[in-house]
Amino acid sequence: MQLAIVQGRATTTVRHKSLAGVKLLVCSLLDVAGKPSGDPVLAVDRLGAGAGDKVILTSDGLGLRDLLKDNNSPARWWTMGIVD
């Protein structure tokens, strides 16, 4: 699990079939000091997070495949929670 800050939403013209109708967020992973670190990642969101929200991301492949109901999804990151 990793803390991240949501930069905004990603829109696409073509998607993998497993991502049809799924909201994608552009997120910056946070380091131990709470500052953005590294390149942004795309995360699947089913919780309703928005720009500026701090979220808990995970790269648990089994959980994401279960969430999307597709064993061949190319997605890696997904939101597990929104930090209050």
Image (cartoon, rainbow, N blue to C red):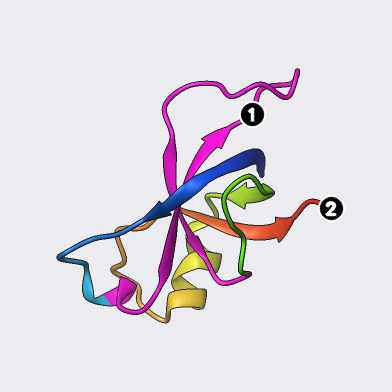
Residue drawn where x is 51% and y is 76% of the image:
67
Q: Could you tell me the amino acid type at mark 1?
A: Leu
The residue furthest right is 84
Q: Position of residue 40 (x, y in %)?
A: 43, 34
Image vertical order of residue 66 relative to residue 33, above or below = below
C-alpha separation, residue under disc 2 versus residue under disc 1:
16 Å
* Structural crowding at the residue carrying mark 2, measured as other residues with C-alpha within 10 Å and reported as few (<14), some (14–19) or many (≥20): few
Identify which residue, 6 or 68, lies in the foreground. 6
Give the residue at mark 1.
30
Q: Position of residue 52 (x, y in %)?
A: 63, 44
Which structural element holds mark 1? loop
Image vertical order of residue 3 relative to residue 74, above or below = above
The residue furthest top is 33
Q: Is residue 53 left or right of residue 36?
A: right
Residue drawn where x is 62% and y is 39% of the image:
4
Give the residue at mark 2.
84
* Structural crowding at the residue carrying mark 1, measured as other residues with C-alpha within 10 Å and reported as few (<14), some (14–19) or many (≥20): some
Q: Could you tell me the amino acid type at mark 2?
A: Asp
User: Which image quarter holds the N terminus?
Assistant: top right
Q: Position of residue 62 (x, y in %)?
A: 51, 65
Residue drawn where x is 50% and y is 76% of the image:
66
- Mark 2 or mark 1, which is nearer to you? 2
Q: Position of residue 72 (x, y in %)?
A: 28, 68
Q: Quadrant of residue 34?
A: top right
Residue 30 on the magenta span: yes
Image vertical order of residue 69 relative to residue 1, above or below = below
Q: Is residue 14 left or right of residue 41?
A: left
Q: Is residue 34 left or right of residue 27?
A: right
Q: Which residues are magenta?
A: 18-47
Which structural element holds mark 2? loop
